Image: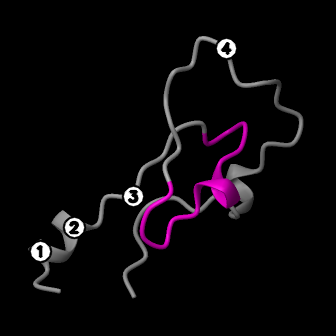
């Protein structure tokens, strides 16, 4: 398995004590592949997408 990117369950992305996400934020956190946006999206990770197709092609997987 290739582990590249961010993982919301890492302590580095703990959002305890942070205020709400700004209402002007228009980004998305999109579930795809093995990335579960509901699990990893919080007040610190406010936008995320799963980009694996290009990486897989590049590595011949």
Residue 15, compared with residue 58, is above or below; it is above
Looking at the image, which residue is at 10% across and 84% down?
60
Residue 30 on the magenta segment: no
Q: In the picture, residue 58 is in which quadrant?
A: bottom left
Q: Are marks 1 and 2 in contact (CB under 8 Å)?
A: yes
Q: Element under label 1? A: helix
Residue 24, compared with residue 35, is above or below; it is above
Looking at the image, which residue is at 14% across and 80% down?
59
Q: Which mark identifies residue 23?
A: 4
Q: Which residue of the protein is positioned furthest toward the top in this rendering?
A: 24
Q: CA distance from mark 1 to mark 2?
A: 6 Å
Q: Element under label 2? A: helix
Task: Tell me the quadrant of the picture where the C terminus can be found.
Answer: bottom left
Q: CA distance from mark 2 to mark 4?
A: 32 Å
Q: In the picture, residue 56 is in which quadrant?
A: bottom left
Give the class, few, some or many, for how many residues have Cα within 10 Å of label 4's Cα (few <14, many ≥20): few
Q: Element under label 4? A: loop
Task: Tell me the quadrant of the picture where the N terminus can be found.
Answer: bottom left
Of the two numbered discs 1 and 3 on the same chain, state the one appearing first in sequence.
3
Give the class, few, some or many, for how many residues have Cα within 10 Å of label 2's Cα (few <14, many ≥20): few
Residue 21 at x, y percent in the picture: 71, 25
Q: Is residue 29 left or right of residue 53?
A: right
Q: Which residues are magenta?
A: 31-45
Q: Which mark identifies residue 57?
A: 1
The residue wearing badge 2 is: 53
Colour scheme in use: one colour
Of the two numbered discs 2 and 4 on the same chain, state the one appearing first in sequence.
4
Looking at the image, which residue is at 68% across and 51% down?
13
Of the two numbered discs 4 and 1 on the same chain, state the one appearing first in sequence.
4
């Amino acid at each position: 398995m290739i582990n590249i990117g961010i993982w919301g369950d890492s302590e580095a992305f703990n959002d305890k004590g942070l205020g709400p996400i700004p209402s002007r934020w228009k980004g998305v956190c999109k579930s795809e592949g093995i990335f579960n946006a509901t699990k990893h999206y919080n007040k610190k990770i406010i936008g995320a997408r799963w980009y694996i197709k290009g990486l897989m092609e590049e590595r011949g997987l």
